[in-house]
Amino acid sequence: MSGLGITVSCTLAGMAAGYLAARRLSSKPLSRHAGLPDAATPHLLPDPALEWLRRAVGALGVWAIETKGPGQGARIYQSLAAEWRAADAELELIEERLSASARRDGEGAERLDAGLLLTVSAGGAVVAALLPSATTQPMQVTVRSDLAALLDGIGRRPVLHDLAQVQDGLAIESVESVGMRLAYQVERIAGAEAYVAALEGTGVRVIGVSGLADRRALGQILRADSALARVARGAEPETSSGDPLGGSATDRRRHPPARVSPMLKQDEAIGGVAWRVPDGGLVGPEAAREVDEAIRAATPRLEMALRLAAETDRAIKDPLTGLLNRRGLSERMSLVGPERGALISLDFDKFKLLNDTLGHAAGDAALIHLARILEEQVRGVDCAARVGGEEFLLWLPGTSLEEGVQVAERIRVRIGTGEWDWQGRSWPLSASFGVAGWPETTRSKENLATQADAALYAAKRGGRDRVVTWSSGMSASAE
C-alpha cells in the first residue's frame, strides 16, 4: 500500500514564495493561521491529511500550499513532528528549496543536514516531505506517490469549495465552477475525459477539465485555430478532432477523436465542450443525448457567470491597460497569505513631454506597452495595477525587500532597453521605481504604499531611471 494510500481526487494554481515567515514549530497545520476553514469545503485535504501522511511515513515535516486561483492569495499548511526541534536556519533553507520548486513542474530530492527533502510541484504549487536521512529507496518511491496524490487533491479543493457553496445557496457560480461541474458531469455520464472552454473577449480559455483529462490544460488560452476554440467562438459547428486543444496542453497520450460541441445561447456560441472516451470506448445513444442535455443546461449558467465576471472586472480593473485598478489591488493585498511582501511604485519619466509631443493616443499606447511588460516580468501570484495617470503599483506577496528591488531593477532595464515607437517615430522610455518591504521597512502592510511612493519621489529627485528603497529619512511629499 502506498503510505496512507491517499487517493482522494481533488486542481491547483499558484503559490507565494517565502511563506514560511509565519511558520510554527508544532505539529499543527498552519491552515488556521492562513484563514478560517471553509465549512462548505470537504476538509480531508489537506487537514488532517498532512498529519496522517507525516505519521505514516515517519517524516519530520510535511508542507502543502494551495490557492483559490491566480492572484487570489495562498493557503499554507504544514505538519511538523513535535520531536523535531527545527532551527530557523533549517526552515529558511527549506523555504528556499520550495520557492525554487514552485518555478518548475516535477519532482525533486535533496539531502539536507536535517534529512532528505522530497518535493512534488505543478502549476506553481508544491507539496514536500522531509524524511530521515536513512530512508530507504522503496519508501522514497512510496512517499513520492502519496505526495503526488496529495498535490492533486489540494488542487481540486478550490473547485469543490465553489461547487459546495453553490449547492448550499451561498454563492453565485463562478466561470470556473460552471466549467468544472460540467466537465465532471460529462465524465460521470459517459466515462469520458472532458474539457470545457469559454469565450472571454477575443480569446478562448479552458475553464474546466474532468478527472480523466489533462489538468495542465486548465486556465490555458487555446490557439485560435484549435477545434475547441473555433467551436467556442462560433466559427465552426459541432465537429470531431483528434487534437481538440490544438496542442496547447502537454499531454502526449494517443487518443481517439474527440467530439467538440458548442455551448449556444440563442444560436450564439459562448463556449464549447470537447469530450471522448479513452482507448476508443463507445458511447451509447442514450449517454450521448444525456451529455447534450448537460451541455444545454450548463449554458445559461455559464452565460450568467461570464456576465458577472465581466461586471466584476469593470469594477476592479483599469479599462485602458486591463491591469487591476486601485480598488482591485487593495482587495488582493487584503487577502490572507504569506506574512511578508514587497510593493513597487513606478511611473514613466517625463511622461508629460511624451504626451505633449506625440499626443495623448501615444501616451495611452505607452501605458499599454508598460502594462504588458509588467505582466511578462512577474509571477502569476503577483498583482500589477494602474492607480493613476502614469502611476503603477506592483504587489509581490511572499517576496523579500531585496527580491523586490531585484524585480524592480529587472523591469527598469527591460523598459529602458526595449524599443518603442509611435507611428514610426522612435521614443526612448524610462521609468523610476520606489520599493518598500513588509516587514523589512514597516510592520504594517497598510504603510507600504506610502513608503513606496516616498521612495519613488526620491528616485525622481535623484535623477530618474533608477530604483530606490524606502528609508526612514524620506518624505512622501510630491515633486
Image: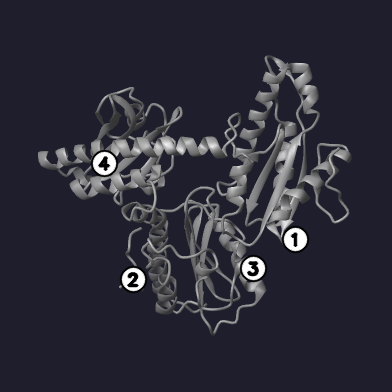
- Which residue is depicted at the point 64% across and 42% down? 326
Label 2 residue SS: loop
Q: Relative to residue 168, is residue 459 depicted above or below?
A: above
Q: Which residue is mark 1?
A: 440
Measured Cα–Cα span from mark 1 to mark 4: 53 Å
Nearer to me, 78 or 105: 78
Which amino acid, mark 4?
His
Quick check: 477 left or right of 15? right
Work out whether residue 205 can be spotted: no
Q: Amino acid at mark 1?
A: Glu
Disc 3, SS: helix
Task: Name the residue carrying label 3.
Answer: 92
Circle 3 packing at 10 Å, graded few (<14), some (14-19), many (20+), is some
At x 58%, y 30%, the residue is: 319
Question: How many numbered discs, if any?
Answer: 4
First in residue order: circle 2 vs circle 4: 2
Amino acid type assigned to the residue bearing label 2 in the image:
Ser
Name which of mark 1 and mark 4 comes first in the sequence: 4
Amino acid at circle 3: Glu
